[in-house]
Image: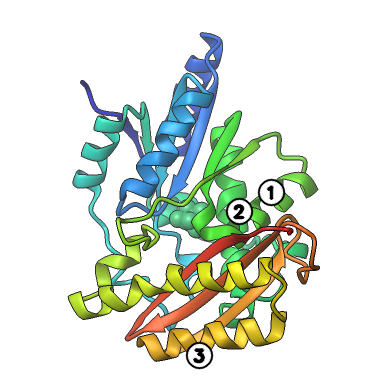
């Protein structure tokens, strides 16, 4: 099986996509920052069910990292990523450098309201501006018919849907279920930072969230369930809990009992920040 075509310029990306369009082919995109794991590969598989060709972008986007965050140490492993894309059957890897995406003089930022308020934004105030700006650029560069995003980054998925609705970006956004290890830990490129002892603790995050979601579904008080979940995470060994919060599944407004909800959390293990989320059933 041959590997994906690799292009690092917007001109070459557009030329290839124009050829595919002329041949009547449908194109799906999977935006990533590389360090590909089984979660990403599941997105590629879904993309290939929805379209004839799959473009995977690999770009560690500096504008979504705060100066205090892990931009420099974020794992970069292009050769390994390309190998995984070959196995998964993706046809094109778009691997632009920073100068291609943000040439000298670049001065635009996209700020999305609605679902970006609260949660991640309370702790990473410029994160979604960086994500929305780079995702809008990728969509304008590749003009995919659809794009697949993991539900692991649930708030990001909601923000990208809002971005496309508000700016009339003609891209169908497909949300894909979170891929988890045998202990329920959500796959994440940042799991690579965890040592053995931290991994054991990390695997409690989904357990605590599921327990709290089950309590909400059977009528438990929301505030005490949230504080109980935060305490359970601290007792399990998380250094700091940024938030545990129940939100409306579609809008991320405060959850109302009887509605589809999502329970979202972010917590620190040593120097690593993990996020996860689970469904809250309306019952
Ligand atoms: O989820 C990610 O990996 C990134 O936030 C994304 C969507 C590729 C934008 O840089």
Q: Left or right of 202: which side holds 53?
A: right
In the foreground, 252 or 115: 252
Query: Residue tagged by mark 2?
Result: 157
- Which element type, helix, strand or loop, lies under badge 1? helix
Q: Measured along the vertical axis of the image, is residue 52 above or below residue 37?
A: above
Query: Residue tagged by mark 3?
Result: 231
Q: Left or right of 103: which side holds 247?
A: right
Numbered-mark total: 3
Which residue corresponds to the image point at 79% horizontal and 67% vertical from the top-left? 257
Q: Residue 63: image x %, image y %?
A: 51, 66
**Residue found farthest to the top:** 23
**Label 2 to label 3, Cα distance in Å?**
28 Å
- 10 Å neighbourhood of mark 3: few (<14), some, or many (≥20)? some
Q: Residue 205: image x %, image y %?
A: 43, 73
Label disc, if present, on residue 161 of the rendered structure: 1
**Label 3 to label 1, Cα distance in Å?**
33 Å
Q: Can you say which quadrant of the picture contains the N terminus?
A: top left
Q: Can you say which quadrant of the picture contains the C terminus?
A: bottom right
Proximity of marks 1 and 2: CB atoms separated by less than 8 Å: yes
Q: Measured along the vertical axis of the image, is residue 124 above or below residue 77?
A: below
- Which element type, helix, strand or loop, lies under badge 3? helix
Q: Residue 130: image x %, image y %?
A: 57, 64
Proximity of marks 3 and 1: CB atoms separated by less than 8 Å: no
Query: Nearer the N terminus, badge 3 or badge 1?
Result: 1
Which residue corresponds to the image point at 44% horizontal and 67% vertical from the top-left? 206
- Which element type, helix, strand or loop, lies under badge 2? helix
Which residue corresponds to the image point at 42% horizontal and 49% vertical from the top-left? 32
Q: Left or right of 66: which side holds 84?
A: left
Which residue corresponds to the image point at 52% horizontal and 14% vertical from the top-left? 25
User: Does residue 238 appear in this view?
Assistant: no
Query: Nearer the N terminus, badge 2 or badge 3?
Result: 2
In the foreground, 161 or 261: 261
């Amino acid at each position: 099986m041959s590997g994906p075509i690799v292009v690092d310029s917007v001109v070459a990306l557009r030329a290839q996509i124009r050829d595919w369009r002329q041949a009547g082919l449908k194109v799906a995109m999977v935006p990533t920052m590389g360090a590909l794991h089984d979660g990403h590969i599941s997105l590629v598989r879904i993309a290939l069910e929805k379209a004839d060709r799959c473009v995977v972008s690999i770009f560690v986007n500096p504008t979504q990292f705060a100066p205090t965050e892990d931009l420099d140490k974020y794992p970069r492993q292009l050769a390994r990523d390309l190998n995984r894309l070959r196995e998964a059957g993706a046809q094109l890897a778009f691997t632009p450098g920073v100068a291609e995406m943000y040439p000298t003089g670049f001065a635009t930022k996209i700020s999305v309201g609605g679902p970006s308020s609260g949660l991640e934004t309370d702790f990473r105030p410029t994160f979604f501006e960086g994500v929305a700006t780079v995702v809008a650029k990728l969509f304008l560069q590749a003009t995919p018919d659809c794009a697949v995003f993991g539900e692991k980054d649930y708030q990001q998925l909601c923000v990208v849907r809002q971005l496309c609705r508000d700016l009339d970006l003609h891209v169908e956004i497909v949300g894909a279920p979170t891929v988890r290890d045998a202990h329920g830990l959500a796959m994440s490129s940042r799991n690579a930072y965890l040592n053995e002892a931290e991994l054991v603790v990390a695997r409690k995050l989904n357990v605590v969230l599921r327990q709290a979601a089950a309590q909400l579904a059977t009528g438990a008080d929301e505030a005490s369930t949230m504080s109980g979940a935060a305490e359970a995470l601290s007792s399990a060994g998380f250094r700091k809990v940024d938030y545990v919060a129940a939100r409306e599944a579609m809008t991320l407004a405060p959850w109302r009992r009887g509605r589809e909800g999502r329970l979202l959390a972010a917590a620190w293990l040593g120097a690593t920040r993990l996020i996860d989320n689970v469904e809250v059933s309306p019952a």
